[in-house]
Amino acid sequence: MLGHPYTGRIYPVSRSHAEIQGLPAYATVAAIPEPVDLAILIIPAEFVPDELERCAAAGVKAAMILSSGFAEARTPAGEALQARIVAIAARHGIVVCGPNAEGYANTAAALCPTFSPAVDNLGVPLVPAWRGRGRVAVVAQSGGMAFALFDRGRPRELAFSYVITTGNEACLESFELVDHLLDEGTSDVVLVYLETLRDPRRFERVAARALALGVPIIVAKVGRSAAGVRAALAHTGAIAGDPAEYQAMFRRHGVIEAADLDEMLDLAAAFSSCGDRLPAGTRVGIGTASGGGGGWLADACTAAGLDVPLLDPRTRARLDALIPGYGCSQNPVDATAQAILQSGYAELARLIVESDAIDAVIMIVSARLAASFEREREALTALTRDSGKPILLWSYTLPGAGTAAIVGQAGYPLFTSMPGCAKALAAMAHYRAIRDRR
Amino acid sequence: MLGHPYTGRIYPVSRSHAEIQGLPAYATVAAIPEPVDLAILIIPAEFVPDELERCAAAGVKAAMILSSGFAEARTPAGEALQARIVAIAARHGIVVCGPNAEGYANTAAALCPTFSPAVDNLGVPLVPAWRGRGRVAVVAQSGGMAFALFDRGRPRELAFSYVITTGNEACLESFELVDHLLDEGTSDVVLVYLETLRDPRRFERVAARALALGVPIIVAKVGRSAAGVRAALAHTGAIAGDPAEYQAMFRRHGVIEAADLDEMLDLAAAFSSCGDRLPAGTRVGIGTASGGGGGWLADACTAAGLDVPLLDPRTRARLDALIPGYGCSQNPVDATAQAILQSGYAELARLIVESDAIDAVIMIVSARLAASFEREREALTALTRDSGKPILLWSYTLPGAGTAAIVGQAGYPLFTSMPGCAKALAAMAHYRAIRDRR
């Protein structure tokens, strides 16, 4: 917490220390000289209920319990400790997150009460300075996976509003938090890692609300295998439930399922970059300097449920004026390296995106060197400003330092995974279709 | 070519320049003062056949043609130019690769006749200095995709023996090159990007030979969709063919199919790191400090066709001595962060790998900081030396600089993709089963 520019007051409470990391410590929560908004509990499990009781008595409004050794221990003692937490929270009306959680990060307040090293010594701000809109919230029963999303997403220039871990969810559960995020209105995409849904009715209500508001919810539901079910129970005392039922419920409510961390982040990148520029259909135009990449991506798009149609004659004539004879304007548009060098990615993308034959464009780029994107910055920015269609970038080389920020500021999500890029575009088309139908 | 420590002689041939980048240029190939092993042709297509004829007449043994504008242009002129190349090669016995290729890299000779920027200004040697065995060869009809594999694989500490692009394959085709790589014996894994197989008989012979030698062939076959088929034809004049027939043929010959660049590299990392330590079956033990990650990976392993069985009582008793009550020894083994901190990844992995209930181990790690792996270097190295079973690492955080080299030297492949890791292990088990059957 001290490693970030959080401006609120922090009061350590300790039986044995008068000072913690330079801050004066208090023997009890009651001794703290002002009302306390939030208690972070990191003491052994057996002491948690009494301390929670003391916090509530002292007027603390909310508590985040990081300690483990509750229901997930699958012992009568652990179950009893968790039951006491539930009872205390109900009696006093104190809001409780956890136990067995990993804390959270509130980036707007630079408040990071967590033991996750993912937010330590970042070397960059918690949120990219340039990113005004497109905030991504994470709500997860697993602390490791929650902060892994932050760890992998921050270098992609994703702006996380919150990373919230819920652990055993003795009281607060994931979709109560999602509901709160919708109330607050500062998160544009929500990623949820889920081992169980304790209240399907609430899920349905919150998911419907998110859909109406246009805040995509991306869910990874763990427990699709016998070993995964076992692990969920041992991890947070979660009953995983029937994967097919979950899938049906997610689909019914426009909630997007993702298979792994990278797919979640690909979806977050797509939705947060493109905002309202969602594709009106599934027809995609592909522009490329690599003929091989074009064919391969066309296969991946088709596998993801997208269409890669032949372009219309007018668009092809305009493209053919740029492309040498050994390239091809059909779609995928193989412009060849020579045409890209002469005309730039933005000009090629503009010709394709203006075609009535397509609803979206994926440009295959080599983002290894940021310099070429820096040179095209204005043209790229003008293109996303003028076009209502989403344009995604897939780089076959690993993006160099700074490329993600340059293209991100210009309004383009940047992918390294080819199927991840294709699936994200398909999910955007599907999400818009569901919203349009409602 | 001059950017690498290649020690052979380079003779530029130019009609208009007396010097090229500091090297004396020759007006014709016949004027070069010694026998030439290889001609690299980068002149416009219409001049290529005559120049190739001159090269052959001058005794040049082989030619790599980078120029485009041949069969892939789908014009009578382009077709005629390519037919002339084929005729000249047949008449003179000169070995021809291309046209419409992107050159190649021979890392042992530091010879990089290619216009791909992927091998320029690397800042590191072409091949990791520590990597003695486990060389990976790339053979691809697409130059962009071939060098993208190098670009993405080198930071993962993969050691590429060759990156060879074949373009239109007017003469030499992919599996003739694979056959040569098997003759030479310095490549331990071969990655092939394929738009078409021009000679299925040769494929079958070479694939059978590779299987007998234990050199895994990993193939990505493009042209699975109408647009992909169109793209392959426009790119290299390739007739893509029926995907189902290709799949059946690959399976019959133990050739492993991969869907994208990342899957190819995950497979290359697994096979090149583990060498002969292939799993005897599909039973995997999972060790983790993140309970959430354990369940998620168990789901991914099951989806990939692996089994995640309960561990035997003896192994569980040994694990329980290390793991706190809120962890779990069942499998996934949720050791908790506390036990990993005390015992280390190597000790946990050793207890799991010694169980008769499993054939392989995946350890879930946070590779963000190299320091913890540096501390465990000896223990990790001893473990792969002692155990005949493969141990794979999946990192939920992005690996820090140096981690891949440390764990690579200790004998572990490091993955960031969870499904990629699971699929690679499943492919290793399948590959061993096929070889054992033969």
Image (cartoon, coloured by chain):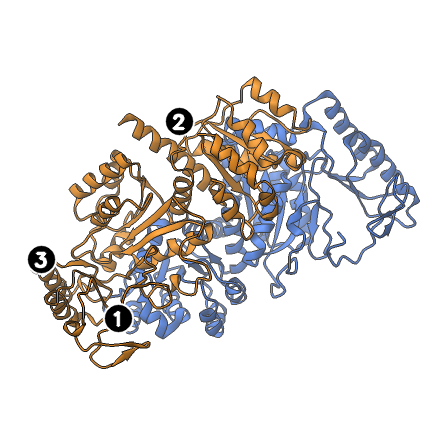
Chain colours: A orange, B blue
Q: Quadrant of residue B334?
A: bottom left
Q: Which type of secondary structure does the marked residue at label 2 adopt?
A: loop
Residue ID at (47%, 34%): A385
- Residue B207 shows in the view: no
How far is mark 2 from mark 1, CA to CA?
53 Å
The residue singled out by tag 1 in the image is B324
Residue ID at (17%, 59%): A96
Residue B356 drawn above or below residue A253: below
Residue ID at (45%, 59%): A124
Residue B21 drawn above or below residue A316: below
Nearer the N terminus, badge 3 or badge 2?
3
The residue singled out by tag 3 in the image is A90
How far is mark 3 from mark 2, CA to CA?
47 Å
Q: Which type of secondary structure does the marked residue at label 1 adopt?
A: loop
Viewer-side residue, B268 vs B4: B4
Residue type highlighted by circle 3: Ala
Within 10 Å of disc 3 (Cα), the crowding (few <14, some 14-19, many 20+) is few
The residue singled out by tag 2 in the image is A280
Q: Is residue A359 left or right of residue B4?
A: left
Q: Residue furthest top?
A: A313
